[in-house]
Amino acid sequence: MTTTPLPDVVLPAPAVLPRARGRDALWLGAGVIVLALSMLAGLFVGAVDIPPQDIVGDLISRIPFVHMHSPLSSIDAAIVWQLRLPRVVLGALVGGMLALCGAAYQGIFRNPLADPYLLGVAAGAGLGATIAIVFAIDITVVGVHALPMFAFVGAIVAVGLAYIVGRSVGAGRSSTTLVLGGVAVAAFLTAMQTFLQQRHTDQLALVYNWILGTVATDGWSEVITMLPYALLALVVILLHGRLLDVMGLGDDAARTLGVRTAQVRIAVIGAVTIGTAAAVAVTGLIGFVGLIIPHVVRLLGIRTHRTLLPLSMLLGASFLVLCDLVARTAVSPSELPIGVVTAVIGAPAFALVLRTSRVHG
Amino acid sequence: MINRMFRRRYHLAAVLGAAVAAVVVAIPVLGRAAASTTRCPTRIVSISPTATESLFAIGAGNRVVAVDSDSNYPPSAPRKSGLIAFSPNAEAIAANYRPDLVVVSFDANKVIENLKRLGVQVVFQPTAKNLAAAYQQIATLGAVTCHKSGARHVVATMQHQITAIRHTAYAKSSGLTYYDEISAPPFDFAASSKSFIGQLFSLLGMHNITNDSSGFPQLSQEYIIKSSPQLIFLSDNRPNDGGVTAHAVATRPGWSHIRAVTNHAIYGLNDDAASRWGPRVIVLMRQISNAAFSYRRAHH
Amino acid sequence: MTRVLLERVSVARGDRVVVRDVSLDVPSGAWVCLIGPNGAGKTTLLHALAALIVHSGTIRIGDGELSRMSRRGRAQQLALVQQDSQLPTGLRVADYVMLGRTPYISYFGREDRNDRLVVAEILEQLDLLGLADRLLGHLSGGERQRVVVARALAQLPSILLLDEPTTALDLGRQLQVLELIREQQCARALTVISATHDLTLAAAYADRLALISCGSLVAEGTPREVLTTATLGEHYGVSLRVIHDEDGSVAVIPVRPPSVTRSPGEA
């Protein structure tokens, strides 16, 4: 790091500078607490009434060397640890990933309407899932079932196609051509998916179920399938926090500041694609989270991506966990599609936050 | 300087690593499945309307404690309006009804795996491809519910009745062409000869206007009119829940040229039976053979 | 203090040559202002200096050559203030100015105490301390321009490039901004290259002018040398009157074309 010698001026204390730094740390701490509470709520509340203190008691009884009899029946314990816990963890993982990716895309495309499905990820994953379902592909590779694998590959291929289409049209550097390429690819892939669905209407319900999105789990397999990709995406995106702020100045300004804009864009888009594809592969298309949560965080006064990204992640995780709680208890013994819950709860909540923030200016 | 830059990264990485390690350790600690039973089930839940019919037919009905909202036959089955086959919740099913056996025809929300984790026995019986598969499903239910002889009896009865119907009707029905409509225009879904119900028609020697391999093709109206089937069957003919009447079909533009329309040979099938593959296929067979009879009577 | 030397620089956009064979010597510590009609190629030339577009010919920055410098090296020497900076409205002034420190921060790094000191000092010098926490969307035109200049100065460049820094500002603000730049130029020993439409202001503040017309450098020298009625009339295609004052200042006055009918009020 080189510096030119500073002119001879009396310097004020750096304390006048981003005072917001301390405030942001507080928000992050609050976000962690909210997530912890949400996950506890998801664990304690469900279609079945199981007293929280018994759950705690059961946990304690499982610690080695602690000789305590569990207060839970074996079926209740199975409900809590084998059904609810993986589901809550998956919800947090997916909600966090979608919100993080949404915030990253809004930053890299400088567009408040961007969401993680922007470049055809949703259409590609949908087509992949439809292919796996209608052709009843049932192979398992390295412990990963065909359905999430096909969805994941479909998502990646779609973004790749969007990139190729975008580059062949425009100058290649503009993000607008990339987005438009994604629109074209998405339209095409969706048409193919619809065609397949029409040819196999007996599988229609299965495909539709997948598209509506669900956080239901089969033990820990979904979490394990998604985890490596999610961690990779998470690390890459979070590390690019400061660079996203710089990219927000526009490509030209960013380049005069010495930033390789094309590389940054590829890195962020690549990470978002992988993270979103992994999320979509295991839970289908859950909408709304990636679009709205970053805006809620912005309405709290968070301006820089360095704080916006992790806070979006924490808030998105909490939000999806709570929405899933509602989805699996509101119409018990049935479940609501989670996409419906995220929209019904999220939209008015967002409008409310928008209104109160406008009051404060 | 480099140390300073990386110290924060170290902290972050350490926290992440600890979290992942905690989860990895927790999995085997928390992941012991509940034990499953192999005795005769005493509390059965069915979220498959076909399985519900079969269960009651083989004599296991007195053990059935809950069925889904679409299981409307037999009327005495304990229907739960909140229990929906396409969006079940394993936790709720297990807790509300405490079943030791659940029969499922559609694996939504990973309900099969989740029920198994709760120690509930699950039998998965998706749409049967043909009659043999349908018989097999009934036999399986018999084995699993300790009603083997009941199941054998039901299957044997079905087989006898089908044979009897074929015996009397084949001469009349053989060679007739038909079109089986699943949903009206503009959707235009038909059941082809390869669908389950199509195979019942084939047993009576009737020819479907389409042999599409997918089972449920979307036909163009031109094709239907051109094929001019001698009989038209409606699998969805309850007008108050979205179905069509024979009159509505006959008055569709261009359809008056179809032989079935000019001959007034449009027949409704029992809506529920037409979408299931249980013991009531006999009802379907009877309806089809009756239609063939009345057609022959009117037009030698 | 860094000298900038352009040798036969040409820039093409697509198959259209926008800047044609420009050779210009900007002495170290000088303020050279590019003037000329719209579309002459002033902005393109500035962008070539900022390495935003490819050029043929040679651009020397001090002892080095622009195209051989590393990205970060360039960013630490040259700062560009664009004509209409896209300011992210949700950012705070202090955070925005801090973005100017990017060339000194590693890819995944974050700003350190030294960066904060630099930004604090710049905010103080440009009288922006009171606005440090204000959102960029809540600034007036003059404040916004000061902030943008602050961000460029945070790069601690030796060369400052400004594209139309006074457009859309009223006269008072225009003078404020130009005075500010002049101050900073002296305080930090900057070489300044700006482009502007306002000939009088250009003459007042720049040491030398370079007149660009249709992509070529057609006149270069002190304001008195370049701003002559003949030169300007020829290249701007309008009637002008140039007044050279005794104290050295130059004013450019447009001459209205003679009208057939006299408007009321005129003799």
Image (cartoon, rainbow, N blue to C red):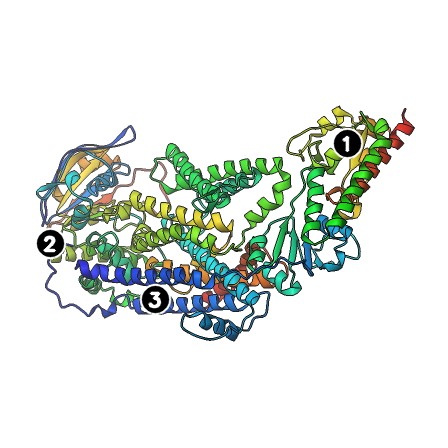
The amino acid type of the residue labelled 1 equals: Leu
**Circle 2 — which element?**
loop
From the image, tell me which residue sits under label 3.
A24
Q: Which mark is residue C167?
A: none
Question: Is C183 or C55 nearer to us in this picture?
Answer: C55
**Circle 3 — which element?**
helix
**Within 10 angstroms of label 2, few (less than 14), some, or many (20 or more) residues?**
some
Q: Which mark is residue B203?
A: 1
Q: Do discs 3 and 2 belong to a common subunit?
A: no
Mark 1 and 3 residues: CB-CB less than 8 Å, in contact? no
**Circle 1 — which element?**
helix
Image vertical order of residue A210 relative to residue B196, above or below: below
The amino acid type of the residue labelled 2 equals: Ala
From the image, tell me which residue sits under label 2.
C189
Separation (CA) of disc 1 from disc 3? 74 Å
Residue B247, image x and y in percent? Answer: 84, 37
Separation (CA) of disc 2 from disc 1? 99 Å
